[in-house]
Image (cartoon, rainbow, N blue to C red):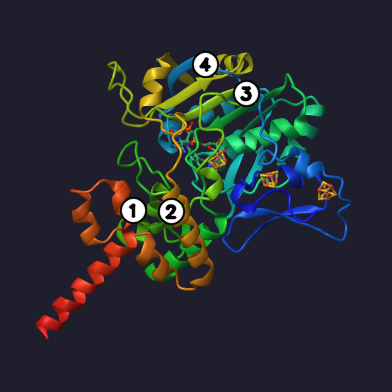
């Protein structure tokens, strides 16, 4: 077998590598995890292709949410440490209290994000917070199956494509399995993040030990913060914020995420977690939202069971699906425009060629002054489309002014 699926459609879910020992997930030249088949050992059985969700789409979704809730963690500290309302931690604690296992994404000391299994409450801190980067799934699906078969309760959390992959890997329903997926905007590559951290660390001449993509000191929202080895902190702005800028503008995201098939309210997980953006705009919301509120889609009776078990740690009130959808294009199946895919492909090609991250950051991942002024007049879509032209125009204007002043 040459390849499992078309590279552009691969989500990096890692299902094929969990199914076959002759496949390994490795970072490719763009830094995304993609399957590599050991051609000497492959026996051409076709199992990997038959199960790949990018080739044979998954279709066993829960048709619509049973409950739509605004939820927040009762523990103020946990709420502060979480990206949204801290619903994940409430679910995880409920399971750990009765001897269960929780799977989620954690950074190691080198900013490599991978899925790990946690059995103690102290381990949850590493899983907390959104990390907007592809997580290496490793052999987590196999591990989860081993726990389930041994009778342990498992909470498996991840992106929707990871939960689909887990469900397809397991093939049957387990009473002791709970799954939670996030509403998902897409993922940049792991290689990109590590390159960015190395660049920023060298630029600021300080070792970076933590990167919080959404710190809450300034409230619930998008406030990226880095922490240095000496304990000092810095909120990221301008060119220093290149990674998050490239993410929110969908410039560094893998192409498979543009037409992701999991952007609707039909879910494969028991519970879906996101931010309840725009909460209160349609119907007044009587509680404070400054530290974040989770949007929960409870998709199955198993999800309702998990919610009930979390009631000591979580408070929630019902809201309407209509309200939930207002701030969630990633539930409304809004596909990205084709020019954005083209732009991502150009950036990825340059990412492989260009050794100097400053060049990439200046060219693509940072809004120049002229673009800032134009952004008050022009729509964002036009701005990002003509980003390169605006940059070049600004450089030309600068040169003209420099010549004049000489
Ligand atoms: C890549 C990504 C894109 C997202 N896009 C949106 C969006 O468009 N709209 C929206 O409303 N919400 C989005 N979210 C979800 C949101 O940011 C919060 O993660 C979610 O609401 C859970 O928040 P919490 O406060 O309950 O828990 P937190 O403690 O903040 O979240 C921790 C949970 O997120 C999981 N997680 C963190 N990073 C990753 C990762 N890279 N891969 C897999 N799992 C991960 C952990 O395993 C854990 O389950 C996204 C999350 C991720 C990871
Ligand atoms: S199973 Fe997942 S990782 Fe493997 S080729 Fe398909 S999409 Fe890519
Ligand atoms: S064809 Fe069979 S042996 Fe070859 S990589 Fe795929 S699953 Fe493995
Ligand atoms: S957008 Fe879709 S394909 Fe991309 S990481 Fe999220 S769930 Fe997976």
| Disc on the earlier residue, 1 or 4 | 4
Residue tagged by mark 3?
61
Q: Nearer the viewer, residue 89 or 346?
A: 346
Q: Nearer the viewer, residue 256 or 200?
A: 256
Tell me the tag on residue 311: 4
Q: Nearer the viewer, residue 60 or 203?
A: 60
| Residue 129: image location, x then y, percent | 48, 40
C-alpha span from label 1 to label 2: 9 Å
Residue 142's place in the image compared with 61, above or below, is below
Under tag 2, what secondary structure? Answer: loop
Residue tagged by mark 2?
251
Under tag 1, what secondary structure? Answer: helix
Q: Which residue is found at the position 64% from the left and 47% from the top?
A: 12
| Disc on the earlier residue, 1 or 3 | 3
Q: Check whether the beta carbons of the residues at disc 2 and disc 3 lie within 8 A of each other.
A: no
Residue 205 image-quadrant placement: bottom left
Q: Check whether the beta carbons of the residues at disc 3 and disc 4 lie within 8 A of each other.
A: no
| Disc on the earlier residue, 3 or 4 | 3
- Residue lying at the far front in this picture: please name it: 338
Check mark 1 vs ligand 1: CB closer than 8 Å? yes or no. no
In this picture, residue 248 sits left or right of residue 389:
right
C-alpha span from label 2 to label 4: 39 Å
Front tag of 1 and 4: 1
Q: Which residue is found at the position 50% from the left and 37% from the top?
A: 184
Q: Is residue 119 visible?
A: no
Q: Check whether the beta carbons of the residues at disc 1 and disc 2 lie within 8 A of each other.
A: yes
Front tag of 1 and 2: 1
| Disc on the earlier residue, 2 or 3 | 3
Tell me the tag on residue 252: none
C-alpha span from label 1 to label 4: 44 Å
| Disc on the earlier residue, 1 or 2 | 2
């Amino acid at each position: 077998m040459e390849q499992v699926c078309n590279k552009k459609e691969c989500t990096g879910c890692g299902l094929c590598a969990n199914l076959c020992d002759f496949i390994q997930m490795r970072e490719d030249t763009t830094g995304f995890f993609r399957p590599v088949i050991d051609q000497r050992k492959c026996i051409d059985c076709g199992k990997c292709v038959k199960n790949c969700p990018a080739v044979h789409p998954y279709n066993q979704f829960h048709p619509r949410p049973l409950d739509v809730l605004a939820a927040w963690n009762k523990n103020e500290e946990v709420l502060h440490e979480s990206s949204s309302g801290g619903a994940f931690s409430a679910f995880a604690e409920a399971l750990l209290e009765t001897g269960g296992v929780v799977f989620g994404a954690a950074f190691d000391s080198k900013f490599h994000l991978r899925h790990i299994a946690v059995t103690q409450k102290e381990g949850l801190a590493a899983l907390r917070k959104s990390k907007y980067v592809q997580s290496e799934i490793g052999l987590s699906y196999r591990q989860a199956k081993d726990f389930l078969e041994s009778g342990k309760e498992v909470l498996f959390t991840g992106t929707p494509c990871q939960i689909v992959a887990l469900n397809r890997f397991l093939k049957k329903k387990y009473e002791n399995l709970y799954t939670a997926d996030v509403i998902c905007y897409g993922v940049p590559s792991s290689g990109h993040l590590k390159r960015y951290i190395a660049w920023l660390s060298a630029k600021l001449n300080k070792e970076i030990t933590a990167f919080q993509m959404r710190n809450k000191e300034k409230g619930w929202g998008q406030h990226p913060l880095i922490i240095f080895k000496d304990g000092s902190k810095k909120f990221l702005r301008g060119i220093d914020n290149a990674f998050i800028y490239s993410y929110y503008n969908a410039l560094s995201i893998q192409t498979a995420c543009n037409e992701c098939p999991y952007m609707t309210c039909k879910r494969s997980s028991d519970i879906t977690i996101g931010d309840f953006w725009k909460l209160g705009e349609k119907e007044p919301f009587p509680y404070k939202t400054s530290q974040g509120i989770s949007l929960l889609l409870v998709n199955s009776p198993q999800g309702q069971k998990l919610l009930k078990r979390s009631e000591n740690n979580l408070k929630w009130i019902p809201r309407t699906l209509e309200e939930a959808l207002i701030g969630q294009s990633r539930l409304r199946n809004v596909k990205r425009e084709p020019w954005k895919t083209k732009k991502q492909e150009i950036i990825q090609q340059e990412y492989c060629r260009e050794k100097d991250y400053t060049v990439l950051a200046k060219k693509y991942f940072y809004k120049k002054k002229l673009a800032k002024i134009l952004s008050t007049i022009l729509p964002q879509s036009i701005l990002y489309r003509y980003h390169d032209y605006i940059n070049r125009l600004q450089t030309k204007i600068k040169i003209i002014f420099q010549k004049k002043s000489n």
